[in-house]
Image (cartoon, helix red, strand yellow):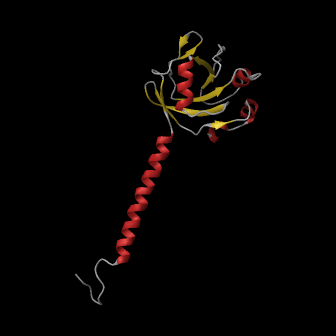
Amino acid sequence: MARRGGKSLFSLTTILASFFGAALVAGAYAYFNYKFSKYKFIDFQQFAFYESNDIFKPNKERYIVIFFSSKEPKAAKEIASLKMKNPILAIDYYNKKIQSTNNVLFLRSGTNTSLKFIQRFNIYDEPAIFIIKRVRDTLYKQDSMIRKFDNLEALAKSKNIEEEL
């Protein structure tokens, strides 16, 4: 079909514009799908962490997870002194038994669980911090990027760490 003036109904410009529009939508979908899949899930029924002698069972909507080493001097004291809006799950790389406080739960686990946890969240250094949020029951999803601190003193001095995550 032709229009007046000799131009076709579907000009090359119209075809290219619709192609690039579709490509833009597909690219945006792929990017956001990739970003969503970057964050990992953890099911506490499959990962056995211990709080003192009991198996940890999560009951809050959000937790701040701090992966640290008890071999660093004063690490446990500095974490215990942190004041956060959400409860803290402090997971020790060396699985030392540390007394929990009101807002900080010190967790430990077996070697296999520790290795699976490190691999699941791609933790390469410590201390590392991130937020997890409940999806349902014992299934939690990573809700922030993983941040690495030079030391726990820097974490304690950071005023709005929860907003920064």
Quick check: 140 left or right of 104? left
- Which residue: 46% across, 41% down? 37
Question: Which residue is located at x 49 percent, y 46 percent?
Answer: 35
Quadrant of the rendering where the N terminus is positioned: bottom left
Pick the residue in front: 74 or 80.
74
The image shows residue 106 at horizontal and vertical percentages of 62, 19
Dividing the picture into quadrants, the one containing residue 78 is: top right
Q: Is residue 115 left or right of residue 82?
A: left
Q: Residue at x 63, y 28 (%)?
A: 66
Q: Is residue 165 left or right of residue 40?
A: right
Q: How many numbered markers are drawn?
A: 0
Q: Position of residue 33 (x, y in %)?
A: 44, 47
Q: Residue 108 location in percent, x, y?
A: 59, 17
Q: Position of residue 119 (x, y in %)?
A: 54, 30
Q: Residue furthest top?
A: 53
In the rendered view of the protein, which quadrant contains the C terminus?
top right
Q: Nearer the viewer, residue 135 or 30?
A: 30
Residue under the image location 68 percent in, 28 percent down: 83
Q: Residue furthest left?
A: 1
